[in-house]
Image (tube, rainbow, N blue to C red):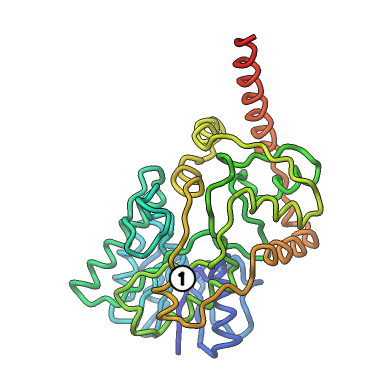
Amino acid sequence: MKALFIGGTGTISTAIVKRLVTELGWEVWLLNRGNRNNVIPEGVHQITADIHNEEDVSEKLGDMTFDTVCEFIGFHVEDVERDYRLFNGRTRQYIYISSASAYHKPAAGYVITEGTTLANPHWQYSRDKIASEEFLMKKYREDGFPVTIVRPSHTYDERNIPVGLHGKNGSWQVLKRMMEGRPVIIHGDGSSLWTLTFNTDFAVGFTGLMGNRHAIGEAFQITGDETLTWNQIYATISDALGVKLNAYHVSSYFLAEAGKACGYDLEGALLGDKAVSVVFDNRKLKTAVPDMCTKVRFDQGVRKALDYIMSHPECQREDPEFDEWCDRVIVAMEKAVKSFTGSLE
């Protein structure tokens, strides 16, 4: 079996490529700009190109055909329109990576299935994913384009710790605040439900859909089965660090408004995603891929990630701007509380 990945070196796709090559014996090709060749397993073939240069990509593909083409960096409908022109008639299956953030926020119920309405008034990123899905399904219905839609939720690997709120340099500054005993902001009251998936678990579900005839013309969400509150997520991280969590809860709406001044899109990331309780019903995926299950619990995944991050200084990227912003939010909240309580005395 022969697969082409557009991208192929990100958090999710790296684990998939590794599984295909080392465990399943696929012939794997990557089409990207070649900026992260150090994470590519031995035996993977490379096409160095910018996917946005359609003419150059078409020339480099020549007469190649594939069993599966996987699009990991398609964020706008123009991207999938281009892919349709490039790969229609060239592949038996085209898998598009959408997003679970495309589901309605908040949905009518917290249990999410593939049939849950797609609508996100808070996040343009999600609306672009929805538009891309709609184009591809139209091409499937009208032209037989062999599309499969995949909707990941919060997937992580050994290079990062998933948190609800962070700055432009990732989660290290949050970990640093934890280790220093400083207040760590948790959105809302921390009781909303969330699902985190380690990338090697995700890879099992994804590779099970590749070449699977039952996946053509269908959408699948791929997540783990473990559901945690955000309070539990942060407590698990602090336990792994061996420190006491100094949690500071702040309204998601307040954070979204406060973030605008510093260029943080927290309306999308929080109100359009993480602030809403979600529990994913994965029965459809498990029917198509019986091997799918959670093998890496969050407490195990956190420790894997911490071991890697602590031994790789390049992962410890400080973010003084975000750090200052957190302090400003906390000071503003404290002043508001004091102002209110003082007026009652």
The residue shown at (51%, 88%) is: 26
Nearer to me, 345 or 264: 345
Q: Is residue 280 above or below residue 94?
A: above
Using the rendered view, name the quadrant where residue 335 is placed: top right
The residue shown at (74%, 60%) is: 306
The residue shown at (50%, 80%) is: 29
User: Callout 1, which amino acid?
Assistant: Ile
In the rendered picture of this protein, how many numbered marks are placed on residues? 1
Left or right of 230? Residue 105 is: left
Nearer to me, 266 or 234: 234
* Quadrant location of the N terminus in the rendered image: bottom left
Left or right of 162? Residue 307 is: right
x and y percentages locating residue 238 in the rendered image: 74, 51
Please name the residue that numbered disc 1 is placed on.
6
Q: For the view shown, which residue lies furthest in the left direction? A: 142
Label 1, secondary structure: give it.
Answer: strand
The residue shown at (66%, 34%) is: 326
Nearer to me, 7 or 227: 227
Q: Is residue 234 above or below residue 247?
A: below
x and y percentages locating residue 200 in the rendered image: 59, 73
* Quadrant location of the C terminus in the rendered image: top right
